[in-house]
Image (tube, rainbow, N blue to C red):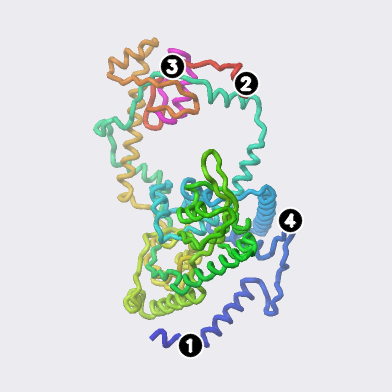
Amino acid sequence: MVMQKMRQFTKEFLIFVVVAFVGTIIFDWGMDITGIRRRPDVMGEVNGERIMADKYYEALRNQIELRRQQGDDELTDQELSMLEDQVWESLVQEILLRQEIEKRGITASDSEVVAVIKYNPPDILRSNESFLTDGKFDYQKYLAALRDPRNDWRPVEEYVRTIIPFQKLQDEITASVVVTPEEVRWEYIKRNQKAKVKYIFFDADKISDDRVVLEEQEIQKYYEEHKEEYREPEKRVIRYAFFPLVPSAADSQAIWNDAMDLLKRARSGEDFASLAEMYSEDPGSRDKGGDLGFFGRGTMVKPFEDAAFQAKAGEIVGPVQTSYGLHIIKVEEKKRENGEWKVRARHILLKYQPSTQTVDEVRTRATLFAMDAIEFGIEEAAKRDSVELQETPPFTRGGFIPGIGFSRDLTEFVFSGEKGDIREQPFETDRGFVVAMIADIQKEHIKPLEDVQTMIRNILLRIKKKEIAGQLCAEARQKMTLPEDFEKVAAQDSLEIKETTYFTRNDFIPGVGREPSFVGAAFSLEPNQISNPVEGTRGYFLIKLLDKTKIDEADFEQQK
């Protein structure tokens, strides 16, 4: 039925699209109907690089929108003027930094991008609601999202690949900073002076719940005083159908044919580096003529590695299929270094990607489904078209949509629409097309007491147990007048004494961990002196210094 309607209205549909596109040029791009812009194309120039009007005004709009989201609905003329200056200066600064990065040849390798995403995610991800538990970044939840094949992380990869060179530049500049002799001496002391102590730990976790008196009104009071900590941002849920972009058999064969053609051209004498620059889809090596440098075994994926190490120097082999696509490989050199063979190679990568025809077919199918969903409802449309529906958990406006990944357009639609809304056009992602219905809207609210009561009870229990631990620690300290009282009181009160090995201010102390207060107190004591109660993360310490080494001035002069 829908297919008949589409055929019937194809001509009118195309006319509408063309008119809508022209309207976009006029109103969004700042042109009049003759194609002349209402603003100048070039706003300025920095070291020969132009700042275009489109980029400037887009950045300004983003900043204004950000202010509005923060509650500044109306900017005064003075505030707008200041914001314009800030946006301009940030664009100039970005160009200067980028030019310096290019001048120094600073880049981001694939392994660095992976390492940052996996082990040191940027703040924009750490603060995303989807990865928080009780308001804190939950690394396990983040890892689960990383491993979910439905999530598209390529926008994150591009973002991280952009910021790494800026961080490297900052590190290089920081490395050139001059430090004072006092700072050098203090650093030497932190690394080399050592202490050894005995300590008694009053562990709050070992205080029995029976010793804690906790009234219901205390829970109510804590809730009232910390209500903002339990504020839940607006969340929404979508039901959606996903139409994946998968290369067809014809697409895969076409890519294989292209690879065979490139192999033939390379073997017939065409410059391999030029072919790589023109055809390779590996962004990390394409601009270097496909040059991967020297690498040993275990560096590359196995099919690639096997082909490269089996080939002779000067030989061109392929196509080699890996999870990345098809590779044409030219082995440039081989050498033996520290008993290990290494290969220097170039490659041309062709990725298995759907053709334009395949993309159009998938887009058409998704569009027809969207029209059915609007006409009959998404559930009925799914039954009619044999399409599987999925539903997200509630998510915030942060940009990450569970199961889909990052999609700005879809996020904007979801958080600007009403429950039940479906857009006529599917949303396009790198992995496919999405037809989504807003299934639920959870308005911003503060969690009711009954939802957080158990959490608050546990917080107050920990606080009170720690207070009791502090009292026990103080009582024990009052009994200690002489150095030997440390052991006597411990024996009388059945307190366990533990002894450390020698440690520096920078060390992780077994049984203690990294407790700055413990370390500071230990190094402030003289031998046989007993500390006052020292508050730690999980309880209180009494510390008795056994020994503290002196600074070796001759060694310092040699190392400073």
Magenta residues, start to end: 512-534
Q: Nearer the viewer, mark 3 or mark 2?
A: 2
Q: Quadrant of the N terminus?
A: bottom left
Kind of residue sitting beneath label 4: Val
Q: CA distance from mark 3 to mark 2?
A: 29 Å
Kind of element beneath mark 2: helix
Q: Identify the residue shown where x is 37% and y is 65%.
A: 440
Query: Where residue 545 is drawn, which disc sits there?
Result: 3
Against 159, residue 139 (above or below) is above
Is residue 320 among the parts visible in the rendering?
Answer: yes
- Residue ranking furthest to the left: 210
Kind of residue sitting beneath label 2: Gln
Q: CA distance from mark 2 to mark 1?
A: 85 Å
Where does label 1 land, which residue? 9
Q: Residues within 10 Å of mark 1 (few under 14, many from 20)?
A: few
In the image, taking residue 482 as reference, residue 257 lies left or right, namely right
Contact between labelled residues 1 and 3, with CB atoms less than 8 Å apart: no
Of callouts 1 and 4, which one flags the residue occurring earlier in the amino acid sequence?
Answer: 1
Q: CA distance from mark 3 to mark 1?
A: 88 Å
Is residue 443 among the parts visible in the rendering?
Answer: no
Of callouts 3 and 1, which one flags the residue occurring earlier in the amino acid sequence?
Answer: 1
Where does label 2 land, which residue? 558
Q: Identify the residue shown where x is 36% and y is 60%.
A: 393
Q: Identify the residue shown where x is 30% and y is 50%.
A: 450
Contact between labelled residues 4 and 2, with CB atoms less than 8 Å apart: no
